[in-house]
Image (cartoon, helix red, strand yellow):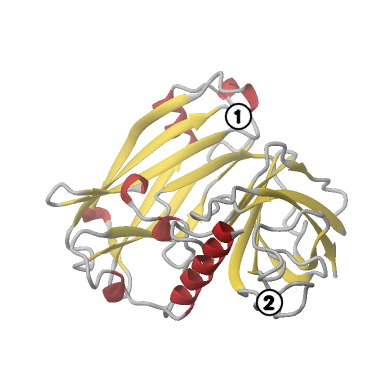
C-alpha cells in the first residue's frame, strides 16, 4: 500500500506541473533552453491506402521547427517498411530509404518552412518489391521521416522525447502508419455519443481520483477522417466524493481517442491532447487489446469497443488493464 500511495502522489504532482503550463507555447519557447532539438510538426496528413485505387498514396505536410526557424535544417529523409498483418508477417519488408526532400523544395508558412512529403502506392511497391497480390486490406505500410541538419545531426523517433512523439500539440511522431483499408461510409459512427464504461475492473488509482472512465458516462463528439474516428474526452473526469472512497477530484485531463477501422477490426490509440499525465515517463495512454474489437457497418446506434487503459502506464509501474466502452448515439 505504501508503494501505491507514493506512486499516486507522484502521479498527482506530475499532472499539476503540466496543468499549470501554457499549451499554446511558441516555437521560441519550445527551444528556449536547447541547442539540439528539432521537430517535424504534422500540419496535414493523408495516410490511408484504399483497396482498388491505384493512384492512392501518403501525403504529409510537415512544419520544420528548429532553434533558428528552420535555418539549421538541410533535408528530410523518407523511409518505408511494410507489415503483412493479414499474412502473419509472411511478406514483411524491412525499412528502406524511399526519397529525400531537400530544403530547396520547402515552402514557407507564416514564419517556418513547410515540407510536402508524398509516397504513392506504386513508389512504395517498387521500393519494397511488393506485387499487387502481396498485400490486402488490413496490411500496413510504415513511413518514417528523419530531419537532417546542415551539420549532420539527425532527428527522428529514436531520439525524441515521449512528450513530442505522443502529444497532439507538438504533433511530431516522425512515424506514420499507412493502412491498406476497406472504405467506411463517412457518416458511420459520427456525431454525438454517450460513452460509458461497462466493464467492471477499475483503474489502478481508483478510488482516490475517481474513475478513469466513468460508468455514468460522458458525452463525446466523434469526427471522421477516412476510416479514422477521433474525439476528445476527459480522463478521470469526476469531482471529489463522486465515488465511495474518493478523496481527491479527478484530473479532468483532456485526452484524444482515435479509432481506426481496419477491414473488420478496430485499432485504438489514446494520447494526451497537451501536457502529460503520468509518473515521470511520458503520458498514460490507451491501446488495442490482443483481440481487437469488430464493427458492423449496418449499425452505429450502439458500438462496443474494447481497449487497454494505462498502455503505456507512463512510469507508474501498474501495467495495463482491460476496458469495455459502450457508445450510444444521441
The one of 308 and 177 positioned closer to us in this rendering: 308
Q: Quadrant of residue 25?
A: bottom left
Quarter of the image where the N terminus is located: bottom right
Quarter of the image where the C terminus is located: bottom right
The one of 22 and 28 positioned closer to us in this rendering: 22
Crowd class of label 2 (few under 14; some 14 to 19; many from 20; radius 10 Å)? some
Residue drawn 23% across the image and 49% down it:
75
Crowd class of label 1 (few under 14; some 14 to 19; many from 20; radius 10 Å)? some
Q: Judge left or right: residue 123 versus residue 257.
A: left
- How far across and down, in percent of the image, does residue 230 sit? 64, 61
Mark 2 and mark 1 lie on one chain; the one further toward the N terminus is: 1
Label of residue 247 in the image: 2
Q: Judge left or right: residue 197 versus residue 136.
A: right
Give the Cα distance between marks 2 and 1. 45 Å
- How far across and down, in percent of the image, does residue 254 sit? 59, 71
SS class of the residue under badge 1? helix
Q: Is residue 179 above or below residue 114?
A: above
Q: Judge left or right: residue 91 versus residue 171.
A: right
SS class of the residue under badge 2? loop
Q: Which residue is mark 1?
A: 85
Amino acid at each position: 500500500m505504501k508503494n501505491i500511495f507514493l506512486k499516486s502522489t507522484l502521479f498527482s504532482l506530475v499532472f499539476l506541473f503540466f496543468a499549470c503550463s501554457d499549451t499554446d507555447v511558441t516555437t521560441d519557447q519550445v527551444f528556449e533552453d536547447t541547442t539540439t532539438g528539432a521537430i517535424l510538426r504534422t500540419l496535414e496528413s493523408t495516410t490511408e491506402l484504399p483497396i482498388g485505387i491505384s493512384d492512392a498514396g501518403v501525403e504529409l505536410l510537415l512544419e520544420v521547427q528548429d532553434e533558428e526557424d528552420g535555418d539549421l535544417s538541410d533535408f528530410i529523409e523518407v523511409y518505408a517498411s511494410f507489415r503483412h498483418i493479414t499474412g502473419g508477417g509472411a511478406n514483411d519488408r524491412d525499412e528502406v530509404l524511399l526519397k529525400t526532400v531537400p530544403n530547396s523544395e520547402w515552402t514557407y508558412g507564416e514564419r517556418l518552412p513547410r515540407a510536402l512529403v508524398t509516397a504513392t502506392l506504386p513508389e512504395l511497391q517498387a521500393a519494397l518489391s511488393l506485387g499487387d497480390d502481396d498485400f490486402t486490406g488490413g496490411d500496413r505500410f510504415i513511413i518514417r521521416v528523419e530531419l537532417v541538419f546542415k551539420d549532420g545531426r539527425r532527428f527522428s523517433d529514436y531520439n525524441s522525447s515521449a512528450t513530442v512523439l505522443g502529444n497532439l500539440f507538438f504533433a511530431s511522431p516522425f512515424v506514420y502508419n499507412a493502412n491498406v483499408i476497406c472504405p467506411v461510409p463517412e457518416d458511420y459512427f459520427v456525431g454525438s455519443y454517450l460513452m460509458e464504461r461497462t466493464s467492471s475492473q477499475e483503474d489502478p488509482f481508483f478510488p482516490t481520483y475517481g474513475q478513469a472512465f466513468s460508468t455514468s458516462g460522458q458525452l463525446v463528439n466523434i469526427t471522421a477522417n477516412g476510416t479514422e474516428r477521433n474525439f476528445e474526452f476527459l480522463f478521470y473526469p469526476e469531482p471529489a466524493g463522486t465515488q465511495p472512497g474518493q478523496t481527491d477530484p479527478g484530473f479532468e485531463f483532456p485526452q484524444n481517442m482515435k479509432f481506426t477501422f481496419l477491414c473488420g477490426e478496430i485499432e485504438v490509440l489514446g494520447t494526451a491532447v497537451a501536457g502529460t499525465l503520468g509518473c515521470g515517463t511520458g503520458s498514460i495512454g490507451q491501446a488495442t487489446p490482443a483481440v481487437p474489437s469488430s464493427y458492423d457497418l449496418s449499425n452505429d446506434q450502439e458500438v462496443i469497443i474494447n481497449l487497454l487503459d494505462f498502455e503505456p502506464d507512463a512510469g507508474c509501474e501498474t501495467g495495463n488493464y482491460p476496458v469495455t466502452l459502450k457508445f450510444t448515439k444521441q
